Image (spheres, grey):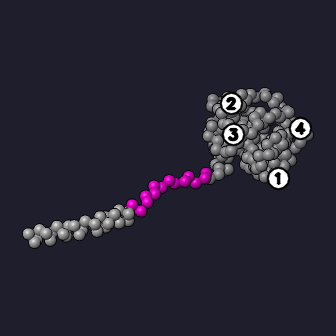
Amino acid sequence: MSITRRLLDGFVAGYRGRRIGLVVLGNPPALWLPLTTDRAVARDAVSRLRPVLGGRLSDMGATLQLVEQRFREAGEKVVVLVTDGGLQLGATSPLAAARALAAAGNTLYVIGIGAGEPGAGGAEQGGLIYEPIDAVFLQALADAGGGAFFHAQDTDAFSAALSTIESRHRRPGAAIPVERLVEPWYPLPLGLAMALLLLSVWWPLLRGGRRAGADA
């Protein structure tokens, strides 16, 4: 969990979306952070995540339903489900809840943390492997939600998954207005007109002076 918190914190710190919220996967699930534009608040919420906040069992269907209900006013959303793919309980099918999310215009991505084969669990230094996951089920869940499944067996894979999700939904920023220095042209003709005016005034005097010198 400490590694997961660190990776999520980095993701939130560099998040370029408008708002972000958190729901804890559990039985029952819980709203951990309402939608906010304050990344400092979001990072604080991530730092307080604990493995048993929602209980040791999870109701994935109810969790996805809670996401849709509590964040419905946000319109189209990108939902990232991070799970170890443990035992799922609940009356609502996770696949049905994922399809409902997609039907509402949302995209569900699933990041599975754990070993890919039975008996491959355990802890590795810098790794995230501790229990086998049902990759087939999680892939089907992501497909139902219109997104993609990422199997994060180490920190690099987890970070890459978050980066891929963010880049897929990154909106091009508004064009930055270019400031140009506008130099008005009116001083040039005005200066020329002043020069001609002065010349018209002084020219007769100059000519008169030259003639007087010539006559002398």
Secondary element type, mark 1: helix
Q: On the image, numbered disc 3 is attached to which residue?
A: 37
Task: Give the residues in magenta.
Answer: 173-187
Q: Residues within 10 Å of mark 4 (few under 14, many from 20)?
A: some
Q: Which residue is mark 1?
A: 103
Residue 27 x %, y %: 85, 33
Observer-side mark, 2 or 4, equals 2
Q: Which tag, 1 or 4, sits closer to the chain's start?
A: 4
Q: How far is mark 2 from mark 1, CA to CA?
A: 32 Å
Image quadrant holding the C terminus, namely: bottom left
Report x, y in % for residue 151.
70, 42
Which corner quadrant holds the N terminus?
top right
Going from the N terminus, do you reach mark 4 or mark 3 first?
3
Q: Nearer the viewer, residue 19 or 111?
A: 19
- Residue at figure coordinates x 62%, y 40% from the top left: 14
Q: Is residue 93 magenta?
A: no
Q: Is residue 42 above or below residue 18?
A: above
Q: Quadrant of residue 134?
A: top right
Relative height, residue 160 to residue 179 (above, below)? above
User: Which of the marked residues, 3 or 2, is nearer the chain's N terminus?
Assistant: 3
Which numbered disc, 1 or 4, marks the residue closer to the eye? 1
Which numbered disc flags the more N-terminal residue, 3 or 1?
3
Q: Secondary structure at mark 4?
A: loop
Which amino acid type corresponds to the residue marked 1 in the rendered image?
Ala
Q: Report how far apart the C-alphas of labels 1 and 4 lie in the structure.
A: 21 Å
Residue marked by disc 2: 44
